[in-house]
Image: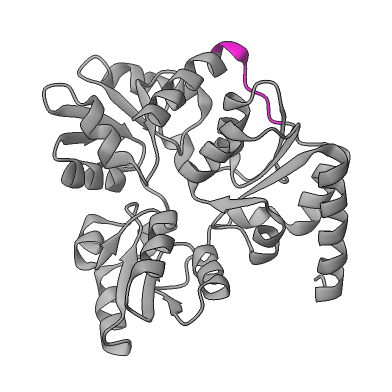
Amino acid sequence: MFSSEDSRKLMEKIERLKDEKNAVILAHNYQTLDVQRVADFRGDSLELALAASKTDADVIVFCGVDFMAETAAVVNPDKKVLIPCRKARCPMASQLTPEMVREARESGPFVAYVNTLASVKAEADICCTSANAPKVARAVAKDGLCFLGPDANLAAFASRAGGVEVKAVPEHGYCYVHKMFQVEDIERAGRKYPGAEVMVHPECDVDVQLKADFVGSTSQMYRHALESKAELFVVGTEIGLIERMNAEIEGKKFVPLRRAVCIEMKLNTLEKVYLTLRDESNVVKVEEKVAERAREAIERMFGV
């Protein structure tokens, strides 16, 4: 276990390395606070994908899970993309295969959630994130229908908010972190924190979404908290965002709907960030033929 002094010294070393190597660090909202603090950009998948596409850095250290680093590599073929821990792999990303996308596309357009590997994005018509899924679904639906995977709850949210029929592929794809939240948690929170606003992620079960006051991506939750007149929020997503909001948003308090931790996200420690940047190790590469096609789907998303 590192002391606060150890962490401070590591952060200083990381800052020096960033300058020396013209490097940038991107950190998802689910990273630990020390990793978020050393990052140049913090946000959700959409914000980080946009940041990756616009950076002029030579080296990108992506503090997230495998599909995120792959996306950065796809949109930056001329840059070196690193991930602090090779084992940081999103379980949901493996629930959707290229073959499943090809089969579904015989019946309509396919929207690949950004939480997929590049090989899946390469087969899709377009990508989406939890922040823009309804908008993307509405834009690409043919005869009022499109397919979206792998998260079935996000597909249901995109259908409800986008006003089109969105079929989930696979039918029961899910995120194990957001699957933890139940309606009973919201009812319990209502008794314990009367008057608090309940915010949940669209990867939560549909009955949980319908019971909440606000449904959105992590960046949308952050912005909503800034704009809302409420001072107390109960938040249904991974604990990293809640820790970030408590640290950065003054005058407001954020409590977890229940303590939910993404084990894979937490594999990227401050020490691993330092070692990866120092050694330029764990380089993320995507086969060029796959990257070209995946890039098209990602860029179509940026254009919606």
Image position of 150 (left or right of 139): right
Would residue 217 be found to the left or right of residue 134 on screen? right
Image: 74 above or below 34? above
Residue 169 in view (yes/no): no
Residue at point 61%, 13% (across, down): 288
Q: In front here: 57 or 189? A: 57
**Residue 58 shows up from this direction:** yes
Q: Of all residues shown, which one is farthest toward the left?
A: 143
Q: Position of residue 256 (x, y in %)?
A: 43, 74
Give how far across and how far down residue 138 sits, in percent: 21, 33
Q: Quadrant of residue 80?
A: top right
Left or right relative to 293: residue 15: right
Name the image quarter holding residue 285.
Answer: top right
Please state the extent of the stretch shown in magenta in the rendering: 284-289
Task: Look at the picture and state if 126 lies above or below 46.
Answer: above
Question: Vertically, is 3 above or below 288?
Answer: below
Question: How many numbered tags mark residues here?
Answer: 0
Q: Is residue 109 above or below residue 28?
A: above
Q: Quadrant of the N terminus?
A: bottom right
Query: Quadrant of residue 270 in the image?
Result: bottom right
Q: Principal SS element in the magenta part? A: loop
Magenta residue check for 231: no
Q: Position of residue 140 (x, y in %)?
A: 24, 25
**In the rendered image, which quarter contains the C terminus?**
top left
Colour treatment of the image: one colour
Q: Is residue 85 left or right of residue 295?
A: right
